[in-house]
Image (cartoon, helix red, strand yellow):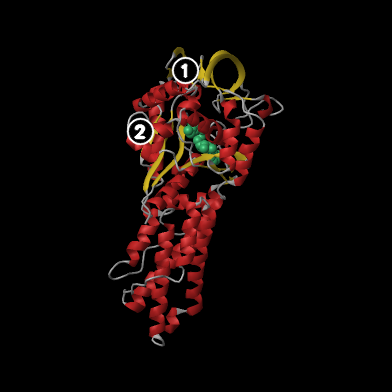
């Protein structure tokens, strides 16, 4: 057993609305790896939370006719509850409106100022409130719209403070090429390197006209650009400027999980800022693709969202966790829908895993008096270990495919060997067959535990009872 620290993060979500299945995606993925690392003995810190500053949230609150604080509190609670509902168990849930964060960000900015990498200048640019970021004209559609939000960015002219990102071009390129800052999947690494090679421009780190943001410590007429405030949450949570010992222990982060739309913030701006204040950049950044609905990105701003809570109520948390990580290869875009979830539920969960568990426990009750022998190592241990390694490398869909190959193998073995025909004829063979299959199913449960914690526990408990009895269906069929 290793005794390493493992610091994994999911993004902190904007509280302009409640969570949707796209926001649940990153958080489920991070939860799976956090659970796996906890099993293997690591000291895990899994962080997520909410981003609560900025114009986007202020405008949404106004539209909802609510005071910003109240609005943010309500939505932050919805995120936290939804994660709970989905079996997601972070070690910390940070909100950017907390005092601990304001204090850490203030220290961070003072350090940044003293690095000599900031200066004041006039700026004119196109700002997309949906993205909370400035856009180059080349990033817009021919009609001048933000491609992610289908909206025209607003022209902003103001005097701001800037960070000399341009000075970090070579060093970032070297670190990313050498995988010192590892970007996965490979296409995203190339995309980031391509972006860096086009030349990095300095970035504005403050805004004069933005509402609801943290104050810039040395210029009270300016507020901190929300994205920098948000990125710094990863340092606040492990004690930057407050608990140096804890910070030293957990920083740098081992893995930041993000959607592909926010990769540049994490792989370019964030490491450069950390280098400027003398801290290590994150070790790894893993970007996933988008869930689409009929080919279009699902987003709060576009209003085509699926509420994960509805799916959890109907199918259970484990089924939803399984579906999102199995259906779309991590890193690629993919369409999701309730119909697709139903297909996977009935075929993979009810017929595959559920059927294996109920028929096996039934036969153990009937033919072995409910008792099984302990087996050192199941016939499929190596396959399950492969699946766990794949999980640790964020290859969730392949890991699950492997586990389902083992499930299919076990079901086929039952069909082929027909234990019911062995009864009374070859009881020794019947006994060893059922014992072997029970050991395989125990291993399956072990491989599934990070993905489907409740189901894995039901299987484990079912197979470790003193007298095993036919189990209730894990996943009742759905019409
Ligand atoms: N507040 C920033 C993140 C700051 S992290 C220091 C933000 N918030 S967000 O709420 O807009 O999005 C959070 C995450 O949700 C992003 O990783 C984004 O990619 C992800 N998703 C939003 N819509 C999504 C889909 N339709 N599909 C998959 N992921 C999606 O950005």
Residue at the spot x=43%, y=14% of the render?
218
Give the crowd class for mark 2: few <14, some 14-19, many >=20 residues within 10 Å. Answer: many
| Residue 316 in sight here | no
Between 250 and 80, which is closer to the camera in this rendering?
250
In this view, the residue farthest toward the bottom is: 425
Tell me: 143 left or right of 437.
Answer: right
- Mark 1 or mark 2: which comes first in sequence? 1
For the image, the number of numbered tags is 2
In this view, the residue farthest toward the right is: 142
Give the crowd class for mark 1: few <14, some 14-19, many >=20 residues within 10 Å. Answer: many
Residue at disc 1, secondary structure: strand
Q: Which mark is residue 223?
A: 1
Mark 1–mark 2 distance (CA, rounded to whole Å)? 23 Å
Q: Is residue 180 above or below residue 391?
A: above
Looking at the image, is mark 1 or mark 2 nearer the viewer? 2
Residue at the spot x=43%, y=23% of the render?
111
Q: Is residue 257 above or below residue 137?
A: below
Query: Where residue 343 sits in the image (x, y, percent)?
Result: 54, 56
Q: Quadrant of residue 425?
A: bottom left
Q: Is residue 354 above or below residue 340?
A: below
Between 168 and 125, which is closer to the camera in this rendering?
168
Tell me: 460 left or right of 16.
Answer: left
| Residue 232 in sight here | yes
Q: Which mark is residue 239?
A: 2
Query: Where residue 124 sits in the image (x, y, percent)?
Result: 61, 16
Residue at disc 2, secondary structure: loop
Residue at the spot x=52%, y=19% of the render?
118
Query: Where residue 379 sits in the image (x, y, percent)?
Result: 45, 71
Query: Where residue 87 sits in the image (x, y, percent)?
Result: 39, 47
């Amino acid at each position: 057993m290793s005794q390493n620290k493992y610091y994994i993060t999911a993004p902190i979500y904007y509280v302009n609305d409640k969570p949707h299945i796209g926001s649940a995606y990153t958080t489920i993925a991070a939860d799976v790896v956090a659970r796996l690392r906890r099993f293997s003995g690591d000291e895990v810190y899994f962080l997520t939370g909410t981003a609560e500053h900025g114009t986007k949230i202020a405008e949404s609150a106004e539209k909802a006719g609510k005071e910003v604080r109240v609005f943010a509190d309500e939505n932050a609670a919805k995120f936290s509850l939804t994660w709970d509902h989905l079996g997601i168990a972070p070690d910390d849930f940070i909100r950017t409106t907390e005092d601990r964060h304001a204090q850490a960000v203030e220290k961070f900015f003072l350090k940044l100022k003293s690095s000599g990498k900031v200066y004041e200048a006039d700026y004119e640019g196109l700002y997309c409130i949906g993205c909370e970021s400035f856009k180059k004209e080349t990033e817009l559609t021919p009609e001048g719209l933000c491609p992610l939000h289908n909206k025209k960015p607003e022209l902003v002219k103001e005097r701001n403070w800037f960070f000399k990102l341009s000075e970090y071009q070579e060093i970032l390129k070297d670190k990313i090429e050498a995988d010192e800052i590892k970007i996965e999947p490979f296409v995203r690494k190339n995309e980031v390197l391509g972006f860096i090679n086009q030349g990095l421009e300095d970035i504005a780190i403050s805004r004069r006209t933005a509402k609801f943001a943290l104050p810039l410590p040395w210029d009270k007429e300016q507020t901190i650009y929300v994205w920098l405030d948000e990125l710094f949450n990863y340092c606040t949570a492990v004690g930057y400027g407050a608990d140096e010992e804890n910070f030293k222990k957990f920083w740098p982060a081992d893995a930041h999980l993000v959607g592909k739309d926010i990769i540049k913030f994490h792989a370019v701006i964030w490491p450069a800022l950390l280098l400027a204040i003398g801290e290590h950049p994150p070790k790894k950044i893993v970007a996933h693709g988008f869930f689409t609905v009929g080919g279009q990105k699902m987003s709060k701003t576009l209003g085509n969202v699926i509420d994960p809570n509805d799916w959890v109520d109907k199918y259970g948390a484990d089924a939803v966790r399984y579906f999102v990580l199995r259906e779309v290869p991590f890193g690629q875009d993919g369409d999701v829908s309730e119909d697709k979830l139903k297909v996977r539920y009935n075929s993979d969960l009810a017929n595959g895993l559920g059927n294996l568990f109920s028929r096996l426990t039934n036969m153990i009750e009937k033919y072995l008096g409910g008792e099984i022998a302990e087996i050192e190592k199941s016939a499929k241990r190596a396959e399950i270990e492969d699946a766990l390694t794949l999980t640790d490398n964020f290859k969730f869909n392949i890991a699950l495919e492997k586990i389902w190959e083992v499930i299919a193998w076990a079901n086929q073995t039952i069909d082929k060997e027909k234990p019911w025909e062995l009864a009374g004829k070859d009881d020794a063979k019947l006994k060893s067959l059922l014992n072997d299959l029970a050991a395989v199913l125990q291993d399956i449960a072990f491989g599934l535990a990070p993905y489907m914690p409740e189901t894995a526990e039901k299987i484990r408990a079912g197979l470790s009872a003193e007298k095993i009895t036919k189990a209730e269906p894990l996943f009742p069929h759905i019409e």
